[in-house]
């Protein structure tokens, strides 16, 4: 019951891993600050939180809007509430060969996964350094430790978050504030909804339930763990990538060649469509 009577702020709380962690914290009797853009979904999570014995506070927030993020923290510390844990987790991903990703998809990933997460961590630090106490947990990904063809921009944002968190950890340690990154492999959530990811989750091996990730996050709370990899296979893969990258090269190249969009390929309507192939056989 380590979160009993604690205040836990969660971004991306309306769905998936964020929602699962909100329910986990609620079972301990925590006050859970629920943040994302969809107020209706957050209200549903609040009801679930309160059925489990926690207290839910809904603060609709768009992490790409700095004022919205600041407001989230001001609402959280209202009435002199102590902020114990921030789960900086909101994120999204679009799969595709780099030449096919749209400008909107690229900006969305960078705005939410990188700038949004950094702004949440910044305001968490503003509060926690003053408190001289707290724990910031940031959702990176297994994709923040390895590279994956067709996930290039997503991978870039998650490596950036891994590096960002590793850099602020010593800054904040002296103020009694811990920083942990979470690196899940594939997780069964709306992240893979058809309008977002454009892939078949079955192609990504054994995906785990969001509750498994929530349990791993819970286990890390109030420890000084630097990184949490979940499931176990994620650590094996990360170690292989780090120490024997050549072994994976062939697999990654094959994966890149074999990639197929779930949707029908679109007609090439781009302004570059007249460029001719110089290495095609016919
Ligand atoms: N699923 C996986 O396989 C997997 C693996 C590794 C890492 N991750 C990471 O885990 C985190 C959570 O993803 P998930 O799998 O739980 O996906 P999910 O079910 O799609 O949840 C994503 C959450 O992010 C919120 N969000 C998106 N844009 C936002 C914005 N601009 N402002 C505020 N909130 C926003 C969404 O809420 P609204 O739409 O209501 O705003 C939703 O609550 C992400 O950082 C993701 O990159 C996922």
Image: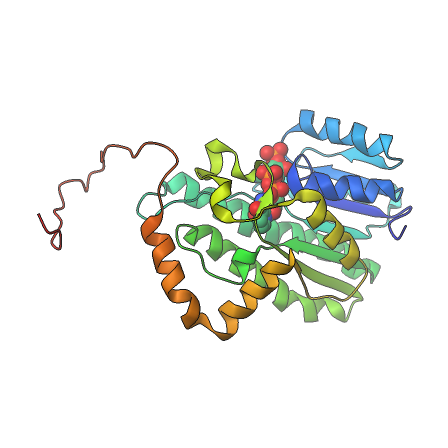
Q: Is residue 251 visible?
A: yes
Residue lying furthest top: 40
Q: Position of residue 173 (x, y in %)?
A: 75, 69
Seen at 64% across and 55% down, the residue is: 231
Query: Which quadrant holds residue 40?
Result: top right
Please tell me whether residue 129 is drawn above or below residue 268 in the rendered image.
below
Q: Position of residue 77 (x, y in %)?
A: 81, 45
Seen at 36% across and 39% down, the residue is: 261
Q: Position of residue 211 (x, y in %)?
A: 72, 44
How many numbered marks, from 0 up? 0
**What colour scheme governs how the chains and residues are painted in the rendered image of this protein?**
rainbow
Please tell me whether residue 78 is drawn above or below residue 160 in the rendered image.
above
Please tell me whether residue 249 is drawn above or below residue 255 in the rendered image.
below
In the image, taking residue 96 as reference, residue 144 lies left or right, namely right
Q: Nearer the viewer, residue 43 or 64?
A: 43
Q: Is residue 163 visible?
A: no
Judged from the image, the quadrant occupied by ligand 1 is top right
Q: Nearer the viewer, residue 201 or 176?
A: 201
In the image, taking residue 102 as reference, residue 281 lies left or right, namely left
Q: Position of residue 129 (x, y in %)?
A: 77, 61
Residue lying furthest bottom: 243
Query: Which quadrant holds residue 162?
Result: bottom right
Q: Nearer the viewer, residue 7 or 79?
A: 7
In the image, taking residue 278 as reference, residue 263 lies left or right, namely right
Query: Which quadrant holds residue 67?
Result: top right
Seen at 52% across and 34% down, the residue is: 193
């Amino acid at each position: 019951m380590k979160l009993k009577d604690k205040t836990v702020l969660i971004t991306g709380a309306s769905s998936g891993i964020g929602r699962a962690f909100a329910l986990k914290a609620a079972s301990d009797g925590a006050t859970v600050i629920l943040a994302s853009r969809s107020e209706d979904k957050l209200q549903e999570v609040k009801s679930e939180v309160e059925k489990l014995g926690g207290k839910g506070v809904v603060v609709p927030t768009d992490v790409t809007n700095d004022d919205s993020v600041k407001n989230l923290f001001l609402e959280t510390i209202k009435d002199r509430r102590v902020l114990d844990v921030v789960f900086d987790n909101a994120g999204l991903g679009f799969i595709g060969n780099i030449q096919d990703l749209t400008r909107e998809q690229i900006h969305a990933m960078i705005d939410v996964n990188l700038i949004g997460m950094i702004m949440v961590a910044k305001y968490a630090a503003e509060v926690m350094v003053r408190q001289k106490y707290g724990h910031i947990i940031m959702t990176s990904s297994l994709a923040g430790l390895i590279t994956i063809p067709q996930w290039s921009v997503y991978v870039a944002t998650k490596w950036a978050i891994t590096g960002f968190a590793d850099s602020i950890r010593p800054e904040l340690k002296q103020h009694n504030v811990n920083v942990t990154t979470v690196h899940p492999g594939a997780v069964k959530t709306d992240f893979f909804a058809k309008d977002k990811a454009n892939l078949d989750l079955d192609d990504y091996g054994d995906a785990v339930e969001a509750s498994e990730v929530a349990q791993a996050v819970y286990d890390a709370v109030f420890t000084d763990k630097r990184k949490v990899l979940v499931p176990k296979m994620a650590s094996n893969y990360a170690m292989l990538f780090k120490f024997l990258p050549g072994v994976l090269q062939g697999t990654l190249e094959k994966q890149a060649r074999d990639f197929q969009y779930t949707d029908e390929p679109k007609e090439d309507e781009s302004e570059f469509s007249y460029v001719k192939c110089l290495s095609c056989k016919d």
